[in-house]
Image: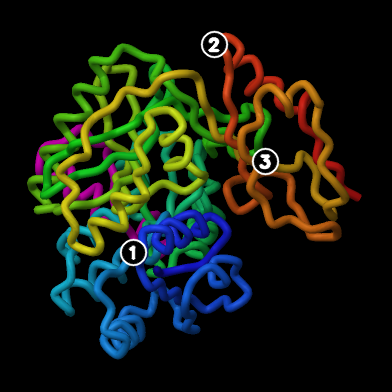
Amino acid sequence: MLGGSLYQVYAIKEAVRLGYYVITCDYLPENPGHRYAHEYHNVSTTDKEAVLSLARELQVDGVVAYASDPAAPTAAYVCEKLGLPTSPYKSVEILSNKDLFRDFLQKHGFNSPKAMGFITYEEALEHIDEFRLPVMVKPVDSSGSKGINKMTNKSQLRVFVEDALHYSRGKRFLIEEFIVKKGHQISGDAFSVDGKLVFHCLGNEFYDSTCEKDFAPLGECWPFQMDYRYIEDLEQQLQRLMTLLKMKSNAYNVEAIVGQDDKVYLLELGARSGGSLIPQVTEYATGVNMVTYVIKAAMGEDCSDLKQVLPTGFWSNYMVHSNETGRFVRIEFDEEFKNKHLVEWVTDIKMGDSVHRFRDAQDCIGEFILKYDDMEQMFHVIAEMDNFVKIVVE
């Protein structure tokens, strides 16, 4: 298991529950997941050769990069080298790098905004007039909206490029034209078995309009609220993409948007499970434990019993965050909210820890899983969350 962070604990526990001998590795020995594994090694999950050497030495039977963008290529690389179950490393590399992904989509005729990848500010400056503003400036290999900015004036380019490069491990960034969306952004997880899309649970992404980055998601909610024909269109695009990339049995995190032109644009297809407790919410909504299939696929087990199940009920996750920068004191709940809606609350925040006013996922201090009686109630509670939950800082 590549990584032992708070949000990877669930998968580590699931692998143990399934009866496997579980080994974790990353460069943070204090990460909570390691205490649930049988064995831990201090090796960075992004150091492909070091992980390969460790996996070879330990004679592992499978490698999982659960809910981790940076570790997904490592898992595919190691498995390919050792002949273990995996989708192709080159394909996972494409899915894990926004510039390679956009280039692949454009070359194969998918709906895609105008986009170009760059290494330097000077290089981007030479081409910026070829774009119609606003544009998004993004690191090619970050997650959680880190280092992503919406540029409305060329004078912002240098600062946004520097921010993107700060969060890019490969020191590359992407500029792409902004798509004005119609309705909700589409978000959720999917799974392919032997290259065939067999399951997905796609919902609606929601945001905080008062946030500095109003495009940084606060969470997702289910069921899907737009015309289902958009999902059917997206299913076709996903299957075509999986076929072109020769994907095998794999979990995916899906992000898509419907433009004002009524076209469905596939924004991201991460070759790993979603973070933010998306697989857990999916299980509440559908009864399908996708994490079980992630582990079974990594071990080469039969996953052919996985079938599409439509979600029932009304559910969301939610990035718990502070509206102020300071030191964490406590969290206060409205008791009715806590008793009626709160299903799970995952955090490792401690009194005195530094918190930052929410900008993007790096400022998240925990995650809720919430349930609701109906659609109207769901969107009301999400919109009025500050009235039900208060993060006290000093």
Q: Earlier in the sequence, mark 3 or mark 2?
A: 3
Of tags 1 and 3, which is closer to the observer?
1
What residue is disc 3 on?
A: 320
In this rendering, the answer to whether 335 lies above or below 268 is above
Q: Earlier in the sequence, mark 1 or mark 3?
A: 1
Q: Residue at x 36, y 64 (%)?
A: 19
Q: Residue at x 19, y 36 (%)?
A: 198
Q: Position of residue 47 (x, y in %)?
A: 38, 79
Q: Is residue 119 visible?
A: no
Q: Nearer the viewer, residue 166 or 194?
A: 194
The three-letter code of the residue at mark 1 reads Val
Q: Earlier in the sequence, mark 1 or mark 2?
A: 1
Q: Quadrant of residue 67?
A: bottom left
Q: CA distance from mark 3 to mark 2?
A: 22 Å
Question: What quarter of the picture does the N terminus occupy?
Answer: bottom left
The three-letter code of the residue at mark 3 reads Val
Q: Position of residue 362 (x, y in %)?
A: 60, 53
Highlighted range, magenta? 99-125
